[in-house]
Amino acid sequence: MTDHAAVVQGEPVPKNRVDAFLQTVPERPSRGAGNCATSHVGAAGNHRHDAALSAPARAERQRRRWATQVVVADELARRACAERGLAPVAEVSPTLLLTVAEKDVADLGSIIAAALAHSPAARTLLAELEAEQDVPEEAVRDYYDRNRDRFLTPDALRRGVDPFGPAAPTDFLPYEQARERIAQELRRAAGRRAFFAWFDRARADVVYAAGHEHPGDPSHPDHEHRH
């Protein structure tokens, strides 16, 4: 029996790292095992061994697969930080209870959200990718012009001004005041997209041990793929 959960760039990731991470999360991970609100359960008729498992056993196996993805994300992020010469990050305490905001799960998917909550390396890498993003002035201005409802002044909000109706220019925050906040939001969104793209590329060659595959892997019958 293998003692590793996955092999990353030729090096094994021990199962005990997954076990340690599982101690920090509730019995069931946050909604969203991968990135959709719908579960797809394969036909069990061709998988008698899987069909014989009880529902709690199948749920626990999915939980372990989900946890493996989070640990793999942490391992990949550690390596990416080292390659980029980023400052070393503190070790994760295995006894630290993991809490993930529901909004982050909805925005990021539970694997990425949990990885960012669990892994200092993942957060460091995300911050680096975000800092690398160039947000053109045209994109900032376009966002301001297309989302006027977000820039009503407090007085205009109190008066119930319709931002898409006959509003006066003074009912809106000036572009110069809103610009930096918009640029930060766009840079943050671009950084997250870059992080998603990095993770998809980085884990493409990861080899998983049996029982530790991605929870959305259609090759096993109780897979779940969530967005």
Image (cartoon, rainbow, N blue to C red):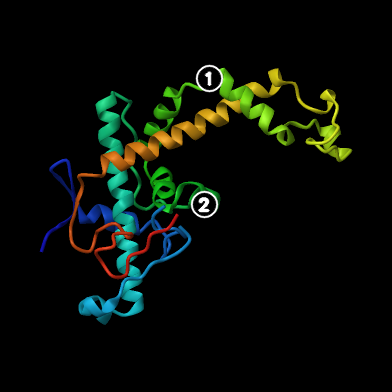
The x and y percentages for residue 81 are 30, 30
Q: Residue furthest left?
A: 1
The x and y percentages for residue 17 are 25, 52
- Badge nearest the viewer, 2 or 1: 1
Q: What element carries label 2?
A: helix
Tell me the kind of residue under disc 2: Ala
Q: Residue at x 38, y 59 (%)?
A: 225
Q: Is mark 1 on a helix, strand or loop?
A: loop
Neighbor class of circle 2 (other Cα within 10 Å; few <14, some 14-19, many 20+) is some
> Could you tell me how many numbered marks the image carries?
2
Task: Work out whether 142 lies above or below 20.
Answer: above
Closest to the observer: 97 or 125? Answer: 125
Closest to the observer: 74 or 179? Answer: 179
Q: Earlier in the sequence, mark 2 or mark 1?
A: 2
Q: Which residue is drawn at 43% across and 45% down?
A: 117
The x and y percentages for residue 145 are 68, 27
Q: Quick check: 168 left or right of 66?
A: right
Viewport quadrant of the C terminus: bottom left
Residue 54, quarter of picture? bottom left
Q: Name the residue under label 1.
A: 136
Viewport quadrant of the N terminus: bottom left
Task: Work out whether 95 lies above or below 204.
Answer: below
Q: Which residue is drawn at 27% across and 47% down?
A: 72
Q: Mark 2 points at which residue?
A: 106
Q: How far apart are marks 2 and 1 (CA)?
A: 27 Å
Tell me the kind of residue under disc 1: Pro
Contact (Cβ within 8 Å) of mark 2 with mark 1: no
Residue 138, quarter of picture? top right
Neighbor class of circle 1 (other Cα within 10 Å; few <14, some 14-19, many 20+) is few
